[in-house]
Image (spheres, rainbow, N blue to C red):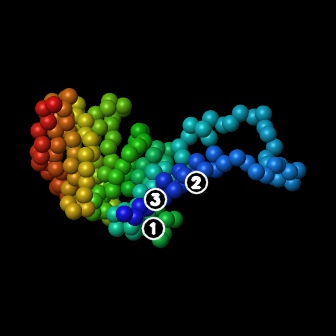
């Protein structure tokens, strides 16, 4: 069986190898002259705690678009661009005041899905935004219910499986959600 290495795993191995490999060359006057002078100034707080310029890039299922998190008016939102025209990226979400921390492509690549709570209440709500039109749909109830995305498959491109604790707070039942209509169908009742 032929095994392949993912790009992320390969990068991790390269980083690990560079740390574990002892340095052979000793610094010279010429190489140290290129280093910036040390400063007694503290590192600016914004540099350490501020938003990154881009975060969590994800390729669409068809490989034609790229999505990532980036600030929109100072709050992390999802941006999307064609893979061959990244400079034309546009934000497709407009969350305020809390940033989006996690998102997914729908299996058919027509929507961006993301979970968001309101004011830190831990009641995660699932939203979807059509990439072509920017139309947003709310898939789950915002009050006292938490959603978990359980799975998605390219074999069933129009729906995903989610877990909702809307019946009993301790247990997440499994539902199939039609992404176009938002209609939910109970797949598995969880009592343990």
Report the residue marked by disc 3: 5
Rendered location of residue 38, percent (x, y)? 79, 40
Q: Is residue 7 left or right of residue 183?
A: right
Residue at left 71%, top 33%? 42
Separation of marks 2 and 1 at Cα, in angstroms:
26 Å
Q: Nearer the viewer, residue 188 or 26?
A: 26
The numbered dot on residue 92 is none
* Between discs 3 and 1, the one toward the N terminus: 3
Report the residue marked by disc 1: 83
Q: Nearer the viewer, residue 9 or 50?
A: 9
Q: Nearer the viewer, residue 147 or 92?
A: 147
Q: From what the image shows, is residue 3 above or below residue 148?
A: below
Is the C terminus in the top left, top right, bottom left or bottom right quadrant? Answer: top left
Dot 1 crowding, Cα within 10 Å, few <14, some 14–19, many 20+? some
Rendered location of residue 22, percent (x, y)? 70, 46
Q: Foreground mark, 3 or 1?
A: 3
Residue at left 78%, top 38%? 39
Separation of marks 3 and 1 at Cα, in angstroms:
23 Å
Q: Is residue 191 left or right of residue 25?
A: left
Report the residue marked by disc 2: 14
């Amino acid at each position: 069986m032929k095994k392949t290495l993912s790009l992320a795993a390969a990068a991790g191995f390269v980083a690990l190898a560079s740390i574990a490999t002892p340095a052979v060359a000793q610094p010279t006057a010429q190489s140290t002259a290129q280093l910036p002078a040390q400063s007694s100034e503290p590192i600016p707080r914004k540099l350490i705690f501020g938003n990154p310029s881009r975060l969590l890039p994800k390729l669409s299922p068809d490989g034609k678009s790229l999505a990532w998190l980036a600030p929109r008016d100072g709050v992390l939102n999802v941006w999307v661009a064609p893979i061959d025209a990244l400079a034309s990226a546009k934000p497709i979400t407009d969350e305020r005041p809390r940033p989006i921390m996690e998102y997914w492509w729908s299996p058919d690549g027509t929507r961006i899905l993301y979970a968001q709570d309101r004011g830190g209440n831990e009641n995660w709500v699932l939203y979807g935004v059509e990439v072509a039109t920017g139309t947003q749909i709310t898939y789950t109830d915002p009050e006292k219910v938490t959603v978990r995305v359980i799975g998605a498959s390219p074999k069933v491109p129009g729906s995903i499986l989610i877990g909702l604790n809307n019946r009993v707070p301790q247990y997440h039942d499994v539902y199939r959600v039609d992404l176009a209509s938002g209609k939910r169908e109970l797949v598995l009742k969880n009592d343990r």
